[in-house]
């Protein structure tokens, strides 16, 4: 049973971290560039819809599960004396925490402000709502993408050196 836990947790950490990174990278590579081509009202409406739709159990599993699994990997690697793997798992955990902190301090507050602006079709100046949201949100999402992809690389290195 112990061997199974030692085998499953690091793999789970890598898989969940991959899903975590893929989500933010998809926004950086396709979603936001696609929405950049939309009109102001359409972009605001789409982001409001995305911000509502993303709050679901699968997102919660990935968003909470990746750091928890990384922490579990770190603990298991430390307990087994696999210090090199523990260092990589620790780096992955730090990068995931950075991503979560950026999400809650930058991206979520902008999502909430966009929601408070009201229904897209009723916003008097959708260009202003967009301008207050998009540039900062996108810039920090790129940081989340880089940090989470680096976390994935660290998770995989921890897994293969363990």
Image (spheres, rainbow, N blue to C red):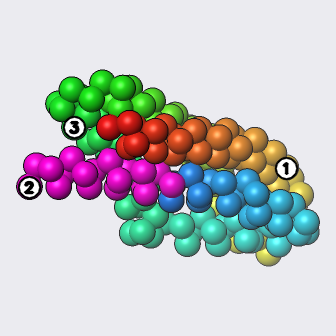
Which residue reaches farthest bottom? 121
Question: Which of pointers 2 and 1 indicates the residue nearer the eye?
Answer: 2
- 127 vs 34: above or below: above
- 6 vs 125: above or below: above
The quarter of the image holding the N terminus is: bottom left
Residue in front for this viewpoint, 159 or 107: 159
Magenta span: 1-18
140 magenta-colored: no
Assign a secondary structure to mark 2. loop
**How dense is the environment of label 2, judged by Cα within 10 Å: few (below 14), some, or many (20 and up)?**
few
Question: Which of pointers 3 and 1 indicates the residue nearer the eye?
Answer: 3
**Which badge, 2 or 1, is on the more N-terminal residue?**
2
Say if residue 89 shows up in the picture.
Answer: no
Q: Position of residue 50 (x, y in %)?
A: 63, 68
8 magenta-colored: yes
Say if residue 98 shows up in the picture.
Answer: yes
Q: Which residue is tagged 2?
A: 1
Q: Which residue is tagged 1?
A: 131
Q: Residue at x 27, y 29 (%)?
A: 82
Q: Position of residue 114 (x, y in %)?
A: 69, 57
């Amino acid at each position: 049973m112990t061997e199974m836990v030692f085998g499953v947790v690091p793999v789970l950490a890598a898989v969940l971290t991959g899903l975590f990174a893929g989500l933010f990278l998809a926004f950086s590579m396709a979603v936001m560039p696609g929405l950049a081509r939309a009109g102001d009202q359409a972009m605001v409406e789409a982001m409001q819809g995305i911000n509502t739709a993303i709050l679901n159990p699968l997102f919660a599993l990935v968003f909470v599960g990746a750091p928890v699994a990384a922490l579990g990997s770190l603990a298991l690697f430390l307990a087994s004396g696999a210090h090199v793997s523990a260092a990589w798992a620790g780096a992955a955990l730090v990068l995931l925490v950075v991503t979560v902190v950026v999400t809650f301090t930058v991206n979520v507050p902008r999502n909430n402000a966009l929601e408070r602006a009201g229904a897209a079709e009723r916003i008097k100046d959708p260009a202003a709502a967009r301008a207050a949201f998009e540039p900062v949100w996108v810039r920090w999402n790129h940081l989340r993408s880089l940090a989470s992809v680096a976390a994935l690389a660290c998770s995989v290195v921890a897994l293969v050196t363990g």
